[in-house]
Image (spheres, rainbow, N blue to C red):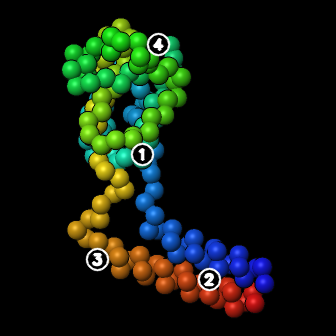
Amino acid sequence: MASIKIVALITMVVILLPTIAMATEFIVGDANGWKPNFDYQAWAKDKVFHVGDTLVFNYPSPPHNVFKVNGTGFKECVKPTTNDQPPLTSGNDKIELKTTGNKWYICSTSNHCALGQKLNITVMEGPPAPAPSSAVRGFIFSGYQVFMAAIVGVFIAVAA
Ligand SMILES: [Cu+2]
């Protein structure tokens, strides 16, 4: 019966869903967006960035832009001199974090970078590593899975 196959498929998804690590989309500065006179280091401080996550820069363009720079460019607010790395200027730029390590971004307009329109993050391996409390979390997950399996089981019994 086709409906049972569909229910079985839903069961699989519901049971597996909590174990799949979800990529996170970080809105840089949250509602503040990307602008001068904002503390992006404070914004980034309590966040953990993983490979596969995405940064979203929201800003009016012009005047702002997003340049990916190196540590020196970040510190001295200097954009890359080569033309092989054009700035992002869409005003809604999504940057997928593809590699681990330090990443630096600045706005090259006027003195915006010096005024704080600069972001430095460290990207970790993805997906998130299990925390020391993984035993506890594993128990919660398996509890959830048993619970959902029971619900779906009842649903199958009713539908059949
Ligand atoms: Cu700017």
Of callouts 2 and 3, the N-terminal one: 3
Q: Amino acid at mark 1?
A: Asp
- Residue, disc 3: 135
Of callouts 4 and 2, the N-terminal one: 4
Query: Residue at 37% of width from left, 46% of height from top?
Result: 51
Q: Is residue 2 visible?
A: yes
Quadrant in the rendering for residue 148: bottom right
- Residue, disc 1: 53
Of callouts 3 and 1, the N-terminal one: 1
Q: CA distance from mark 1 to mark 2?
A: 32 Å
SS at circle 3 = helix
SS at circle 1 = loop
- Residue, disc 2: 152
Answer with left or right where residue 107 lies relative to residue 59. left
- Residue, disc 4: 63
Compared with residue 32, is residue 64 higher up or lower down, i.e. above or below?
A: above
Q: CA distance from mark 2 to mark 3?
A: 25 Å
How far across and how far down the image is residue 50, in percent?
35, 48
Q: CA distance from mark 4 to mark 3?
A: 50 Å
